[in-house]
């Protein structure tokens, strides 16, 4: 009997794993040169437009160069600060306390051209800015940026204890007046400063205790008054323009001043701390002492500088300023993502693809991995160039870039690359659902461009609606570009491009949720429908 051996192919059967499928999809992508060229063009567009805006930004300073950037003081934690106020103080040796009663806080501002309304004898318009401040402070020195702790009355936010520029704790509510004065006290014990307030000078309430590490034996203690820029018109508001800013001043009246731990019989000395261009032009800055009554008028602010420069006269920027063209690059990548699948439907190649890989969900996942990785890998150096080179060029133009940690820089760079990648995956899922190139491309453009424009402009006529565009639509992911914090105790225009409605990673999570839902729906329809 003759035994016939079974036929064995000279080559082993190829593997049909996920990564082999992903490699096949990558081969499809790179062989269509138009897609690769368009993806590279998107990166050039992001950096080209973004870095080109450096020259436009350099003009903001009106000829100001690196000397202006060098003048910006920094606080104990390295944040850029505005430290400008009128200070009446004495040395405080070792431990001690300062107690005062504040009986009045009034304010004025310089009106812009065309203003019609009541003026004070000084020619200023009467208005107490919400975050105008008058109170007492213990600080390391009178050098701008020094560590401090202060108790103060404010224009509209009651008594506050603020420290080291970013700390803010509420005390007694309500506005101060002769009929409703506020008593303030600060005590020092080593590096510990405790703030108290009282409505009658007898019953004291502890507001908070803070640590100021490294205080010298002798510090400064005294009274101060200051008032930040006054916002006119509808400025600032989220994603709206109009109006502007003017310098303002605040006047506080103090009595019942008691300093324990100072020099016996020491004289009170007044000085204007931290001069700045427009604020120096305010008239009447200084103090008057009549017996035990002090009247102090100051201008400026003791606060961190926020993005957009809306609370300072310094020319400032952020590390993300040159990422403004990301939306345009994203639209190009979204078109590529949609066409990555719709082209196969249009040419009938989808049947071949599904025949070679019957597991349709896995095929779609492979496409998502390929388009996502391509966009992420290209987006990473693109974002890094915009952040690093853009910041360097801005500094050379005299623009002070608000300092951030290296972790924040990584967040912005990696986050922008992830934003581009997830947007392309979402577009591919939309293309799978709609299957027609023109319809899918139009849909993804509308999906990103329309809410971006509505959220970044005043078209809707409502700041709240504009803000919601960056909360509930895919463009919420642009929050990943935010590099500087917002502060409740600092008035500013907290809207794009410096600020967004959600925290950075929360905004990106909204886009990821859209992509996940779209992919799930695309997988379901792909399995249910004929090719």
Image: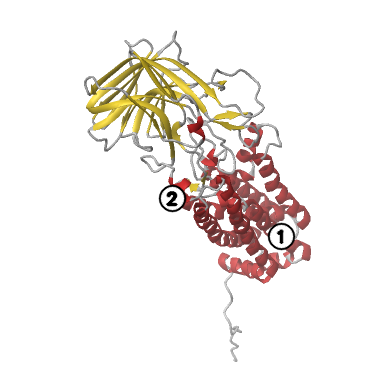
**Where 5 sits versus 269, above or below?**
below
In the picture, which quadrant includes the C terminus? bottom right
Q: Which sits in the foreground, 217 or 313?
A: 313
Q: Looking at this view, is 4 or 480 the one in front? A: 480
Q: Is mark 2 on a helix, strand or loop?
A: helix
Q: Using the image, tell me which numbered label, if any, was put on residue 411.
A: none
Dividing the picture into quadrants, the one containing residue 122 is top right
Residue 118: x and y in percent read 61, 17
Q: What element carries label 1?
A: helix
Q: In this view, does 272 lie to the left or right of 220?
A: right
Residue indicated by mark 1:
339
Taking the spot 43% from the left edge, 19% from the top edge, the residue there is 252
The CA span between labels 2 and 1 is 35 Å
Q: Marks 1 and 2: in contact by CB < 8 Å?
A: no
Crowd band around label 2 with a 10 angstrom C-alpha radius: few (<14), some (14–19), many (20+): few
Figure quadrant of residue 10: bottom right
Residue situated in front as seen by the camera: 272 or 9: 272
Expressed as whole percent of the image width and height from the top left, the position of residue 288 reads: 39, 19
Q: Nearer the viewer, mark 2 or mark 1?
A: 2
Q: Residue at x 25, y 22 (%)?
A: 266
Which residue corresponds to the image point at 60% horizontal and 43% vertical from the top-left? 476
In this view of the protein, can residue 339 be seen by the observer? yes
Residue located 67% across and 47% down the image: 448
Residue 385: x percent and y percent? 53, 59
In the image, is residue 424 above or below residue 179? below
Q: Is residue 419 visible?
A: no
Query: Which mark, residue 407?
Result: 2
Q: Is residue 280 left or right of residue 148?
A: right
């Amino acid at each position: 009997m003759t035994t016939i051996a079974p036929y064995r192919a000279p080559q082993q059967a190829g593997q049909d794993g996920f990564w082999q499928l992903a490699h096949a999809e990558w081969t499809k992508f790179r062989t269509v040169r138009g897609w690769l060229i368009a993806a590279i063009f998107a990166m050039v567009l992001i950096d080209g437009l973004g870095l080109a805006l450096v020259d436009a930004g350099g003009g903001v300073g009106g000829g100001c160069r690196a000397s202006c950037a060098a003048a910006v003081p920094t606080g104990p934690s390295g944040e850029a600060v505005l430290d400008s106020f009128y200070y009446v103080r004495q040395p405080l040796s070792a431990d001690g306390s300062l107690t005062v009663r504040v009986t009045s806080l009034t304010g004025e501002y310089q009106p812009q051209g065309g203003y019609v309304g009541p003026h004070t004898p000084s020619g200023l318009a009467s208005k107490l800015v919400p975050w105008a401040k008058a109170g007492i402070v213990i600080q390391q020195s009178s050098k701008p940026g020094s560590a401090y702790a202060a108790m103060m009355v404010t224009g509209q936010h009651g008594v506050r204890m603020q420290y080291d520029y970013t700390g803010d704790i509420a005390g007694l509510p309500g506005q101060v007046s002769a009929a409703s004065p506020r008593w303030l006290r600060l005590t020092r014990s080593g590096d510990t400063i405790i703030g108290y307030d009282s409505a009658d000078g007898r019953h004291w309430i502890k507001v908070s205790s803070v640590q100021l590490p490294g205080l010298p034996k002798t510090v400064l203690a005294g009274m101060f008054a200051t008032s930040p820029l006054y916002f006119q018109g509808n400025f600032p508001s989220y994603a709206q323009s109009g109006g502007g800013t003017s310098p303002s001043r605040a006047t506080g009246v103090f009595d019942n001043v008691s300093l324990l731990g100072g020099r016996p019989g020491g004289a009170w000395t007044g000085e204007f701390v931290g001069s700045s261009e427009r604020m120096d032009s305010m008239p009447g800055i200084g103090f008057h002492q009549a017996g035990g009554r002090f009247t102090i008028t100051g201008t400026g602010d003791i606060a961190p500088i926020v993005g957009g420069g809306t609370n300072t006269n310094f020319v400032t920027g952020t590390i993300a300023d040159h990422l403004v063209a990301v939306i345009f690059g994203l639209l190009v990548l979204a078109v590529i993502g949609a066409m990555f699948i719709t082209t196969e439907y249009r040419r009938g190649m989808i049947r071949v693809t599904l025949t070679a890989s019957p597991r349709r969900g896995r095929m779609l996942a492979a496409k998502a991995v390929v388009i996502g990785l391509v966009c992420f890998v290209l987006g990473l150096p693109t974002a890094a160039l915009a952040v690093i080179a853009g910041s360097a060029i801005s500094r050379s133009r005299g623009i002070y870039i608000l300092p951030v940690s290296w972790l924040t820089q990584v967040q912005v760079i990696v986050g922008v690359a992830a934003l581009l990648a997830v947007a392309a995956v979402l577009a591919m899922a939309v293309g799978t659902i709609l299957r027609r190139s023109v319809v899918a491309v139009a849909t993804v453009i509308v999906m990103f461009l329309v809410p971006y424009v509505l959220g970044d402009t005043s078209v809707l006529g409502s700041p709240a609606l504009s803000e919601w565009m960056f909360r509930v639509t895919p463009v919420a992911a642009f929050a990943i570009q935010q590099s500087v914090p917002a502060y409740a105790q600092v008035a500013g225009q907290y809207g794009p491009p410096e600020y967004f409605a959600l925290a950075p990673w929360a905004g990106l999570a909204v886009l990821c949720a859209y992509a996940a839902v779209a992919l799930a729906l695309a997988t379901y329809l792909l399995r249910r429908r004929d090719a």
